[in-house]
Image: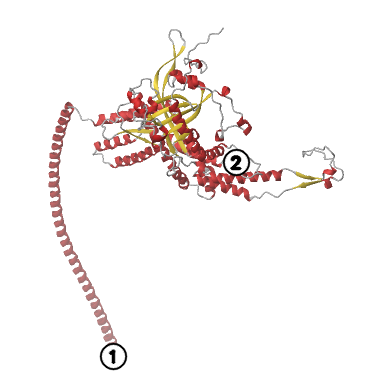
Amino acid sequence: MAEVHSQGNEILVDTPESRASSRQPSQPGQELTSWVFGRVNKWEDFRNMGYNRLWAEYWRMWRGRWSQEDKNRLSERSRLIAPALGQAIEMTVAEIEEAVFSREQWFDIVDNIGDEDKLDAIMARDQLTEDLELANVKDSMSEAVLNAAIFGTGILKVNVEVIKDMTPQRNPDTLRLEAVGDERVQVTWEAIRPDQFIPDPVGTKISDMLGAAHKLQKPMHSVLEKIERGTYRKDALPWLTSHASSRVGHEVDFASEAQANQTLNSHQAETVEVIEYHGKVPLRLLNSLESNRTPLDAVLNQNADGRGDTANLGDGPLIEAIVTIANGSVLLRAMPNPFTMKDRSIIAFQFEKVPGRFWGRGVAEKGYNPQKALDAEMRARIDALGYISSPMLGVDSGRIPRGFKMEIKPGKVWLTQGKPSDVLEPLSIGQLQPNTFNQTQELIQMVQMGTGAFDTATSLQSQSSSGGSGATSNSVFLGAFVKRSKRAIQNVDRNALKPAIRKSMLRYMQYDPRRYPTDATFTVKATLGLVAREVEQLNLTQLMAMLPEDFPEVKIAVAEGIIEMSSSTKKAEIIKAMQAAMAPPSEEEQAKQKELADLSFEQAKAEATQALLENQKTLAEIRKLLAEAEVASRRAETEDDKVEIEQQRVQLQEQEIVQFNQQNQIAMRRLELQEKQVDANIRKINNSTNSS
């Protein structure tokens, strides 16, 4: 026979049947159980009257599941559900997850201003990041955001548990692979569906309510293991019975209503309906469960007038407590709030704020009406296609052979008594209007308009066809969606992330003080806070670039501010290095720096004296050059006078030459006249001689 080792199965539990013989005459804590369950049951009925039907329809719209209740008219046969609303929910949730978890360091913890030592907060942030990553809180947060988008409200529960941190290790002696490790505290986040959450209907915030309960079904073995570990009371074991599993409304995940009605019986299901109540309970009822009684307990069990009628005269002092009930009657656990700040472990946030209400407004509610109209339009179109595409015949039944099978298929032979055209006649009922398809597109746009989400590919394609396909136009086009989703992101940031991170930090500081500091004054910055700090980093970077090189201390201070605003994993090491660089020098270094400064001063003084002498020499040379220039200028003026006199002399000579030429011309003309006169006298003499 093979040997079965018990390694890894150390939790061995007793069954309710094994403890049946030790059952007490009455259940422990029955009065406290009745007090809590009576109120929770009324709160659940009030919640179901207002939201159960709507939540069921939102759930079916998102999942694409059809129900008989979704019929728009009695003659409707199509069960088609358009995916427009589901797409809007998924796109919006994806946008929020991208904004929250896109960075590796998706939250930051900043110490208070008065604390000079900032490194403790940085180390705590890094440690908390690692622990939350091991607990897979991102998945729970994503589920809570998805619940908020569908139902309008997201709910988280911060749990504290002790786990065995086991790792495989090879035994050096036996070479056997063994699991080794130690126990450690782990803080987990649990997403609660709104249909599993029962709040006090009077309050609008968890802290203002009398209490709130988480109602869910758990496997029987899980409850038994917690009883064995001591988490739940051992005296509850004889009273535990299996609870039949049944699901209604939006919980139904079956293909048909008949399958939904086939629920498992109590022996097949082996489930326990657990109600975990967080809120105020009467102190006297909680003290009645303690084994060590005191005289104060007897006083708390009485009312102000000495009677025990708590229903009419009040319940006495109330105390914050956590009460766990199984199957509505078995008390599993009842204890005062164990946390230091006495805060409740449940966090609720609205996807979009509804003033004066606890339940918020989700994407499904915003797109409900256009989605219903879209489903009605598409179902009517599909029903009309059935009449048009499927062939129909009018038949003269008296002229068809008896027992003939009335069906249409290729190759079928129709037997008629007479001419087939007289016995058979095709029938058509109307025509499909083509504009119904355009109306469907408009209804899809109405869903996008109502939810604030849109089909990016279709929208950008239509924009490109209109000519606006540039990066700037696309950024403006997508800006509207970012603005509308900003409200939901802010709600998640303020009302979910910050409280959950703060509660997780406080739980670790309380139950794991060795790894977390004792300083409890800090501020959590997540999502939008990081974006704002990135803008501040950009401004400081621009400021540091504008500073001159003569102010290194100021530049280092600005750089330290930039690092403090960042979420780098090396933030602590960088700040340490910068602080070491800015630390004052030692006495020896100060003496060396003074000596170097004196030598630098003497050298600068000698250089200044040499520069002064060189300047004086340069001034003397400049004066000499100026004097020589003046002498040269005077010489140049004298030479200019001589040249002018010579020019005047040359001009006089030219004038004399001109006059001499004129006199020569006059003399030549005079000679010409004298020659003419001599010639005339000669001719006159000759004439006189001839005449004689």
Q: State the image coordinates of residue 269 (x, y, percent, origin top left).
A: 56, 24
Rendering coords of residue 260 (x, y %): 60, 31
Amino acid type indicated by mark 1: Ser
Residue 304 drawn at (x, y percent): 35, 32
Reply above or below: 6 against 432.
Answer: above
Q: Nearer the viewer, residue 73 or 686?
A: 73
547 lies above or below 232:
below
Q: How many marks can you see? A: 2
Q: Nearer the viewer, residue 364 or 117?
A: 364
- Disc 2, SS: helix
The residue indicated by pointer 2 is 70
Image height of 342 relative to 224, above or below: below
**Looking at the picture, which amino acid does disc 2 mark?**
Asp
Give me the disc on residue 688: 1
Choose top left, top right, bottom left or bottom right for residue 528.
Answer: top left
Residue 152 appears at what percent x and percent y? 48, 39
Q: Secondary structure at mark 1?
A: helix
Looking at the rendered image, the quarter that the C terminus falls into is: bottom left
